[in-house]
Amino acid sequence: MSLAEFDEIHYEHSTNRLDVPSNYLMKKARRNPNGLEELRKSMKSSTIYVGNLSFYTSEEQIYELFSKSGVIKRIIMGLDRFKFTPCGFCFVIYNTPEEALNAVKYLSDMKLDDRNISLDLDPGFEDGRQFGRGKSGGQVSDELRFEYDASRGGFTVPLVDRIGVTQSHNFGARRVRDTYVPGQDQDVDVEDEDEDEEEPDNYIPGE
């Protein structure tokens, strides 16, 4: 499938154009038989997708920021499909496609609640898209996260899985001692065959 009309054109400018589809949309379009049509709809849509939000960002904060680029008709918060709590994304529907495009051009990578939010063009909101698609009910990207992130729910990968994966990537036998687990009084000791080599305490911040 040809996506030539959306592929990058090398203009003689000092900066990249801001009104082009994201790499994510381009890759998705190449995998999807209807991808070209979705790209065309995205360029003419009044809806944008907002990602990398804090779980604690309110609808009022989103309205305050995004109303700077146009008249907002509706904000749909992304929800955990089991808990019905915010899970880090939303859809903003503007009055006109031009206002939506301006938001993507000028508000992308802005900081909101100390997070750099990501914006993308969207072909249009459909009921059901407001729920996370991960197995736990939230977003898939959060289920694959190992580092601690307080504004995105702390740790998502279970402790046992984190230890197992960490050990599998270590070089040589190691011994991990006194790992602090939030909510537990006892320490967790993970020992290997070589007890001569010892690691310093690994502290996992509490939530």
Image (cartoon, rainbow, N blue to C red):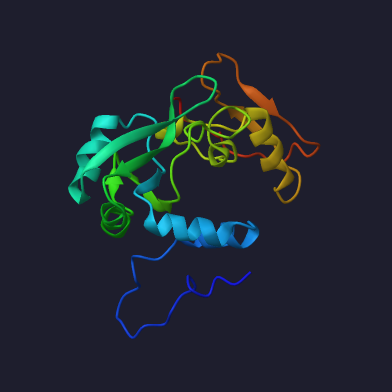
Q: Quadrant of the C terminus?
A: top left
Q: Is 75 on the left-hand or right-hand side of 197?
A: left
Q: In which quarter of the view is residue 89 placed?
A: top left
Quadrant location of the N terminus?
bottom right
Residue 147 falls left or right of residue 113: right
Which one is nearer the viewer's eye here, 169 or 1?
1
Work out whether residue 197 can be spotted.
no
* Residue 140 percent location from the top left of the image: 58, 39
Say above or below: 27 vs 69.
Answer: below
Q: What's the residue at 58%, 36% (across, down)?
A: 143
Vertical arrangement, residue 150 with respect to residue 68, above or below:
above
**Residue 82, image x, y percentages:** 55, 20
Q: Where in the figure is residue 132, as x and y percent of width and height?
A: 53, 33
Instruction: Judge by depth and name the residue closer to the eye, 64 or 52.
Output: 64
User: Which residue extends farthest right?
Assistant: 193
- Which residue sits at x=57%, y=58%? 35
Q: Residue at x 43, y 79 (%)?
A: 9
- Asked where in the image residue 10 lies, by quadrant, the reply is bottom left
